[in-house]
Amino acid sequence: MKDRLNRFMRGRYGADELSRFLLVLFIACVIINAFTRTNIFYAVSLALLVVCYYRMFSRNHAARYAENQKYLSMKNRVLTKLGLTARQREQRKNYHIYHCPSCKQKIRIPRGKGKICITCPKCGREFTKKS
C-alpha cells in the first residue's frame, strides 16, 4: 500500500508553505462553521480544501512554485510591516526594543537591567526606560 502511494505521488508537487496555510484556513473555517452553521463558511472551507489538494497533487511544478513564492513574498511584506521579522521575534525574548523619542532610531536594550538611562547612538539624546 505504501508503495502504491509513493508511485502515485511521484512527480507531483506535494505540500509547501502555501498548502499548509490553506489547511490552517480550512480548519479555521470548519471550526467557525461548527458554531455558526452557515453555508458560507462551509462553501469556503470546501473550496480551500479543493485548492489545497489540487496544489499538492499537481504536476505543474513551475506554476505551484511561483504561487508559493508569491505567497512567501506577501507574507514577508506583512510581517515586515508589523515589525515582526524572524530575527526581531527571536530577540524579543532577551531584549527590549525602544525607539528614540527624537530621531525614531531603534535601540536594543537587554531585559532585566531595571531602570536605565539610554543614549541614542544616532542623535545622542538621553532618555530613561525600564528594561
Image (spheres, helix red, strand yellow):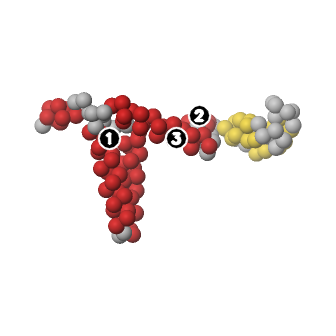
Neighbour tally class for label 3: few under 14, some 14-19, many 20 plus, Cα within 10 Å = few
The numbered mark, 3 or 2, whose residue comes first in the sequence reads 3
Residue 11 as seen in the image, left or right of residue 108: left
Q: Which quadrant of the view contains residue 65?
A: top left
Give me the residue at 40% from left, 41% from top. Answer: 18
Amino acid at the residue labelled 1:
Arg
Which residue corresponds to mark 1?
Answer: 55
Give me the residue at 42% from left, 34% from top. Answer: 66
Q: For residue 87, which numbered disc appears in the image?
A: 2
Contact flag, marks 2 and 1 (Cβ < 8 Å): no
Percent position of residue 25, x then y: 40, 52
Does residue 42 appear in the picture of this structure? yes
Q: Is residue 47 above or below residue 34?
A: above
Residue 9 as seen in the image, left or right of residue 28: left
Amino acid at the residue labelled 2:
Arg
Give me the residue at 33% from left, 60% from top. Answer: 43
Q: Which quadrant of the view contains residue 28?
A: bottom left
Label 3 secondary element: helix
